Amino acid sequence: DQQVKQNSPSLSVQEGRISILNCDYTNSMFDYFLWYKKYPAEGPTFLISISSIKDKNEDGRFTVFLNKSAKHLSLHIVPSQPGDSAVYFCAASGKSNYQLIWGAGTKLIIKP
Amino acid sequence: GAGVSQSPSNKVTEKGKDVELRCDPISGHTALYWYRQRLGQGLEFLIYFQGNSAPDKSGLPSDRFSAERTGESVSTLTIQRTQQEDSAVYLCASSPAYTSETQYFGPGTRLLVL
């Protein structure tokens, strides 16, 4: 029972272009969503988050969009840079606040 | 230390043996989490410690798994009678409070059960 799904295992994007990573969820009780970035042999690092009361949050090159009716969120990276090559995880939390439910991750490859 | 540290970084063991994994959280962080990541999958919550409160053990997959934490310091995750399906990366994270956003992860321990 996957409550958070990232259907694309990998994504390849040209440097300078926009990267769009997608995430779908099934539990309407989720009220907070996060994106983490993970390099090989390192733990995930927090990237950006969004509360369910918003539909957009922007931080520099990174923007997260939330569509509650579709239970879908996306991470946009503009412009994409070689250092953005990593695995990106989508995670969601409910009322307990501390228990995160994670997607399987999308490996982003930025081509020079 | 600046971040969360875990040891060992890699562990190879034989089926049936016990293993102990260690996590040193960031000093001052009251919350500590253990996760498991199997190959090609997302992180799976195992256990959560918050200060001196009773831990949330709801994610532990079986009674072969246990974890301890002394106060707000080091935590150990113990897996008894390891099975091949226990092979995974075990990640530890800490945070200043219960807010999920500020979880800081260690590099993980890669466990391989032969």
Image (tube, coloured by chain):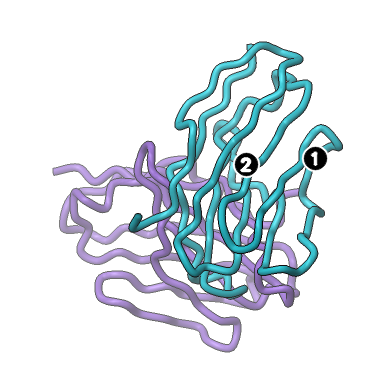
Chain colours: A purple, B cyan
Residue B60: % across, % down:
78, 45
Residue at image coords 63%, 71%: A70
Which residue is the site of mark 1? B61
Q: Taking A88 as reference, is A98 above or below it? A: below
Q: Secondary structure at mark 1?
A: loop
Residue A37 falls in image quadrant:
bottom left
Q: Secondary structure at mark 2?
A: strand
Residue A82 shown left or right of residue A18 in the figure: left
Q: Quadrant of the N terminus of chain B?
A: bottom left
Residue at image coords 66%, 11%: B14
Q: Which chain's residue wears label 2?
A: B
Residue B30 shown left or right of residue A99 in the figure: left
Q: Are marks 1 and 2 on the same chain?
A: yes
Residue at image coords 13%, 43%: A112
Residue B42: % across, % down:
59, 45
Residue A23: % across, % down:
54, 59
Q: Residue furthest bottom?
A: A53
Which residue is the site of mark 2? B36
Q: Are marks 1 and 2 in contact (CB under 8 Å)?
A: yes
